[in-house]
Image (cartoon, grey):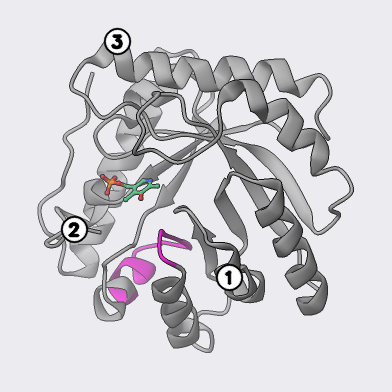
Amino acid sequence: MTSQPAAAHAATTEDFTRNLAAVNQKIAAAAEVAGRDRHSVRLLPVTKTIDTDRLALAIAAGVETLGENKVQEAQDKYEHFIEQFPHLRYAIIGPLQTNKAKFVAKFADEFHALDSLKLAETLQRRLELEDRTLEVFIQVNTSGEESKSGIEAADAANLLGSLAPLDRLTPVGLMTMAANTTDQAAVRASFSLLRETRDRLQQDAPAGFQHLSMGMSGDYELAIAEGATVVRVGQGIFGARSYPA
Ligand SMILES: *Cc1c(COP(=O)(O)O)cnc(C)c1O
């Protein structure tokens, strides 16, 4: 049940329309197998490394949220598109240094990699200055891999609790990157740990804290089987990235 990781390189609006339809169809099929409503899963297109010319084609094909892992690149795209496409949403999905929080506060709508109270407090201050709010996902390291960011599952309740006074942050759920392996059982174990953590937190969590941001081009069908409500898909829509992100 693994997804075809990368689509063929998409270079026209028709290519993007076709690739988006193919991914949406796989999401629908995976949701059906899991006995879930198709509309309980949101496709978040990951647009990192895609230049604004190609992005314009993808936007014409229906892309409405840009998932970016680097703040500078996201901000460049925001500034490029703000007049032409003011409705676009921006999701920062990569780790964030505190000194970049001020940029995120200016234009981002979602942040998927919250991993410390210090960062949350900095975002809160910057959001106050901008008079904005931000949806946040706490990133959990579910694989035990040193290279992955995120906090331990056991620490998630603590961090979530300490966000309560930070009224500019809206905690909407948890995010993870699965173990980097072809072992499907290990990948699934990452996803199910995130779901169990969410379920455990939900009793004391603010209303709206429900989402599981998990699953990428290579594993989003498994993630949906384990309860993903947001899948972050780049290469499955845009084709293989030509250079590392
Ligand atoms: C790049 C990236 C993705 C998407 O990966 P693809 O293989 O292109 O689907 C998802 N999540 C994060 C955090 C990423 O950096």
Label 3: which residue? Answer: 185
In this rendering, does residue 174 appear at all? yes
Looking at this view, is 160 or 175 the one in front? 160
Please report the residue visible at 26 percent of the width from the left and 30 percent of the height from the top. Answer: 180
Name the secondary structure under disc 3: helix
Quarter of the image for the N terminus: give it. Answer: top left
Residue 222, given in percent of the width and then of the height, sits at: 34, 21
Residue 159 among those drawn in magenta: no
Quarter location, residue 243: bottom left
Disc 2 to disc 1, how far (Cα)?
Answer: 24 Å
In this rendering, does residue 31 appear at all? no
Name the secondary structure under disc 1: helix
Label 2: which residue? Answer: 244
Label 1: which residue? Answer: 99
Indicate left or right for 161 with 155 as reference. right
Quarter location, residue 98: bottom right
Q: Bin the neighbour count of mark 1 within 10 Å (Cα to Cα): few under 14, some 14-19, many 20 and up.
A: few
Relative to 11, say whether 20 is above or below. above
Please report the residue visible at 40 percent of the width from the left and 13 percent of the height from the top. Answer: 189
**Residue extent of the magenta highlight:** 56-70
Indicate left or right for 5 with 40 as reference. left
Please report the residue visible at 64 percent of the width from the left and 74 percent of the height from the top. Answer: 102
Amino acid type, mark 1: Asn
Amino acid type, mark 3: Ala
